[in-house]
Image: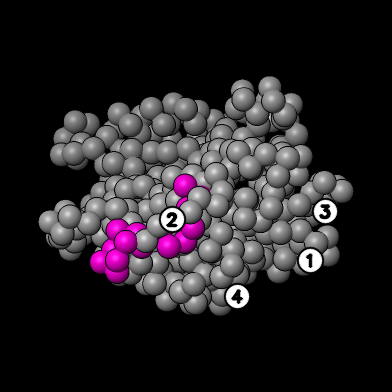
Amino acid sequence: MASDLPDKFIVFGAPDIRREEIDEVVDSLESGWLGTGPKVQRFENEFAVYRRVPTDRVAALNSCTAALHVSMLAAGIGAGDEVITTAMTFCATVNAVIHAGGIPVPIDIEPDSLNIDPQLLESKITSRTRAIIPVHFAGRSCDMDRICAIAEKHDLLVIEDCAHAIETEWHGRAVGTFTDFGCFSFYVTKNVTTGEGGMVIARSAKAIERIKILSLHGMSKDAWHRFGDKGYKHYQVVDAGFKYNMMDLQAAVGIHQLSRVEQAWERRREIWQHYQEAFDNSPVGMPSDPEPDTRHGHHLYTVTISADACGVSRDEFLTRMQESRIGVGVHYQCLAEHPYYMERFGWRAADFPVASAFGASTVSLPLSARLTDAEVNYVIDRTLAIISS
Ligand SMILES: *Cc1c(COP(=O)(O)O)cnc(C)c1O
């Protein structure tokens, strides 16, 4: 019914930008310091405090993709090295491996956690395997005890993709701090945003030094301070680096986003719970509840729509939700569905039965901290109406 339609489209993953972010960006613009400077340093320090790591173990970059790429390089991943990851992730996870010269090896997921299946992991390890990239899907922690034990046994590096998992903890410890590298995203739809942005946490301060050099043209580390007021410094190029540094303009947003990270998490948790209660005893397939003694990041609320149970196909459901002015997402089609990987690596969806079935039936409902109760109720009402019509 037209009268049900909200005034405006419910944007999927809409960021919660407030006056303090706007004022901080204006302050940067007026100061003339737009690039990498004091606000990036402050954002790095505050992020380190939030995740309880020393401040020399973090580097702010311009995306999580960049963070994954330079982590791979700092880890020494190169030509022909195999890196095992999950088939249920964003393409950036495997593209970073490819850009480092490595060969991504996806494996199937557990139906319950939707994370990489540790049971399958060992069977994919070869003499060329160098690393594992666990992805904490939707904000739910992977089983870090099992993954770390397998990595240790086979002498593999671990690089965690924490793009969904800023607030996530495994048995009281922040994900991204267990292993060699943890990579975070501040893309617009993520739990903390800087528009575009990313962060690496590394186990060693030396790795962070190398990442900072690689992320700024390969220039020696003093280059990060060369436009300061401390006197002119010459720089030396010590590597063929990239342009991956974060700007103060981005950090200006991030500082205030981070100061509200827990408040926003509480709100998303509330909405997540509300959805769980609303869809209980309905034909909608619901995500499993968070595991005891872990902290779920509540980044995505992913349901499954099967035509048999719901009387509507997943794609028809997506269309009808969009027509109802509700922005929805798909996280993700199985990686093996994409032509590039099929052609280059010969991946086939049939080899990942759990990930491909989930990818063909999943829908992410809005879970922004900005949603009002009325909007959440509208999403629930439309979902139930569409499946029973
Ligand atoms: C968003 C995302 C990335 C990439 O993050 P960017 O900051 O956009 O580069 C990588 N992995 C996963 C799982 C993501 O969701």
Whether the residue under disc 1 has CB within 8 Å of ligand 1: no
- Residue 230 within the segment the image draws in magenta: yes
Q: Quickly name the residue at label 4.
A: 171
Q: CA distance from mark 1 to mark 3?
A: 12 Å
> Quick check: can you spot residue 206?
yes
Name which of mark 2 and mark 1 comes first in the sequence: 1
Whether the residue under disc 3 has CB within 8 Å of ligand 1: no
Q: Quickly name the residue at label 3.
A: 122
Tell me if residue 142 comes above or below residue 240 in the rendering: below
- Residue 218 within the segment the image draws in magenta: yes
Q: Nearer the viewer, residue 220 or 302?
A: 220
Name which of mark 3 and mark 4 comes first in the sequence: 3
- Label 1: which secondary element: helix
Q: Determine whether, in the image, residue 135 is placed left or right of residue 260.
A: right
Mark 4 crowdedness (10 Å alpha carbons): few <14, some 14-19, many ≥20: some
Q: Main secondary structure of the magenta part?
A: loop
- Label 4: which secondary element: loop
Whether the residue under disc 2 has CB within 8 Å of ligand 1: no
Name which of mark 1 and mark 3 comes first in the sequence: 3
Residue at x-position 33% and y-position 69%: 42
Q: Which residues are magenta?
A: 217-232
Q: CA distance from mark 3 to mark 4?
A: 23 Å
Residue at x-position 36% and y-position 29%: 320
Residue at x-position 20% and y-position 36%: 5
Q: Nearer the viewer, mark 4 or mark 1?
A: 1
Q: Quadrant of the N terminus?
A: top left
Q: Position of residue 371 (x, y in %)?
A: 27, 53
The label on residue 152 is 1
